[in-house]
Amino acid sequence: MPRIRAATITDVPAIHDLLETYASKGNLLPRSMNEIYRHLRDFFVIEVNGQIAAIGALEIFTEDLGEVRSLVVADAYERRGLGRQMVERIVTEARQIGLRRLMALTYVPAFFHKLGFQTVGIDTLPEKVWGVCVKCYKYNNCDETAVVLELR
Ligand SMILES: CC(C)(COP(=O)(O)OP(=O)(O)OC[C@H]1O[C@@H](n2cnc3c(N)ncnc32)[C@H](O)[C@@H]1OP(=O)(O)O)[C@@H](O)C(=O)NCCC(=O)NCCS
């Protein structure tokens, strides 16, 4: 398995480019360079042959709830287990921190179901809705599925 590691400052342009590529396809939200710098400590990366092949972040809302954010496996590396490796790393981190639940908003609930997450109503996640969704351009017509993993 390729090595997974915490992101470093020199990874920011590659993280930004991957997010831009998938945001323009509508898969996930874009994030500015500035936002990535501010949240860099949330990010993990998987490198394959010196290239960033996958990224993912753990964002914390409350003592109760964290989120898998900005999860991308580059096209060329899909379906090789990197997405699973990334989410499992984030789950381990969330457990170590002591979070009770981990959520994601996604267009690929089937991938998260494979990793033990269950689909829930977005109304069960007020921290996400009031912290992030209210600022999102899709707020009134969000078409993503909310999934949750109970950690304890
Ligand atoms: C979704 C994504 C992260 C999956 O990563 P991946 O590395 O291809 O997935 P893995 O190879 O680790 O797959 C793990 C399991 O999920 C399944 N799976 C992967 N993608 C799937 C999909 N789109 N639909 C259904 N199941 C899927 C795999 O078959 C595998 O199942 P198995 O363990 O029974 O063999 C990746 O396709 C991606 O980055 N997509 C574009 C961005 C995106 O949508 N990100 C999610 C934002 S929340």
Image: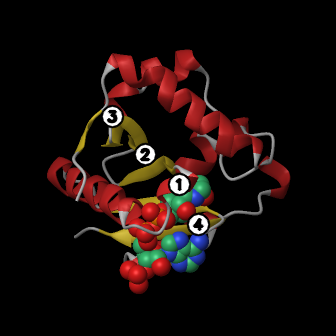
| Marks 2 and 4, how far apart at CA | 25 Å
Mark 2 is on which residue type? Ala
Mark 4 is on which residue type? Ala
> Going 66% across and 65% down the picture, which residue do you hit?
107
Label 2 or label 4, whichever comes before in sequence order: 2
The answer to whether 32 appears left or right of 40 in the picture is right
Q: Quadrant of residue 24?
A: top right
| Marks 1 and 2, how far apart at CA | 8 Å
Residue 50's disc is 3
Label 3 or label 1, whichever comes before in sequence order: 3
Question: Where does label 4 land, which residue?
Answer: 146
| Marks 4 and 3, how far apart at CA | 33 Å
Question: Foreground: 94 or 51?
Answer: 51
Question: Foreground: 46 or 122?
Answer: 46
Mark 1 is on which residue type? Ala
Question: Where does label 2 land, which residue?
Answer: 53
Q: Are marks 1 and 2 in contact (CB under 8 Å)?
A: yes
Label 1 or label 2, whichever comes before in sequence order: 2
Label 3 neighbour load within 10 Å: few <14, some 14-19, many 20+: few
Q: Secondary structure at mark 4?
A: strand
Residue 125 visible? The answer is no
Residue 76's disc is 1
| Marks 3 and 1, how far apart at CA | 14 Å
Q: Is residue 101 above or below residue 138?
A: below
| x and y percentages locating residue 90 in the rendered image | 30, 53
Q: Quadrant of the N terminus?
A: bottom left
Q: Residue furthest left?
A: 96
| Marks 2 and 3, how far apart at CA | 9 Å
